[in-house]
Image (spheres, helix red, strand yellow):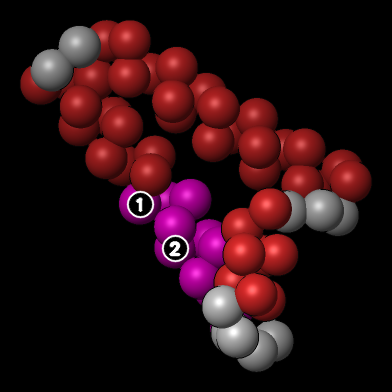
Amino acid sequence: MKNRIVRAVAGTFILISLLLAIYVNQNWLWFTAFVGANLLQSSITKWCLMEQILTKLGVKD
């Protein structure tokens, strides 16, 4: 369950930041890059802050 939530949050952040970049300011693409870099980092280190937050909120695997 945590995996699905993490992916859903990351996908939502990317889509929202792309929309903001199109309609508000292109600097929102930096947020898209940050989310992508965070996904890459978590795939390498197997550590994700969002997973820890979800664990503290009581979400089960």
Query: Which numbered tag is attached to residue 8?
Result: 2
Q: Are marks 1 and 2 in contact (CB under 8 Å)?
A: yes
Alpha carbon separation for disc pair 1 and 2: 6 Å
**Could you tell whether 16 is left or right of 35 in the image?**
left
Mark 2: secondary structure: helix
Query: Which numbered tag is attached to residue 2?
Result: none
**What is the chief secondary structure element of the magenta stretch?**
helix
Q: Is the residue marked by circle 2 packed among few (<14), some (14-19), or many (20+) residues within 10 Å? A: few
- The stretch drawn in magenta includes residue 14: no
* Residue 51 in picture, x, y percent from top left: 67, 65
Q: Is the residue marked by circle 1 packed among few (<14), some (14-19), or many (20+) residues within 10 Å? A: few
Image position of 14 with respect to 28: above or below: below
What residue lies at 32% left-to-right and 19% top-to-bottom?
A: 28
What residue lies at 35% left-to-right and 51% top-to-bottom?
A: 12
Residue type at the position of mark 1: Thr
Q: Nearer the viewer, residue 48 or 53?
A: 53
Task: Tell me the magenta residue range.
Answer: 1-12
Number of numbered markers: 2
Q: Quarter of the image holding residue 52? A: bottom right
**Could you tell whether 13 is left or right of 52 in the image?**
left
**Could you tell whether 28 is left or right of 20 in the image?**
right
**Could you tell whether 41 is left or right of 5 in the image?**
right
Query: Which numbered tag is attached to residue 12?
Result: 1
Residue type at the position of mark 2: Ala
* Residue 14 in picture, x, y percent from top left: 39, 39
Which corner quadrant holds the N terminus?
A: bottom right
Q: Quarter of the image holding residue 18? A: top left
Which corner quadrant holds the C terminus?
A: bottom right
Mark 1: secondary structure: helix
Q: Is residue 3 visible to the viewer in this orientation of the structure? A: no
Image position of 28 with respect to 35: above or below: above
* Residue 45 in picture, x, y percent from top left: 89, 46
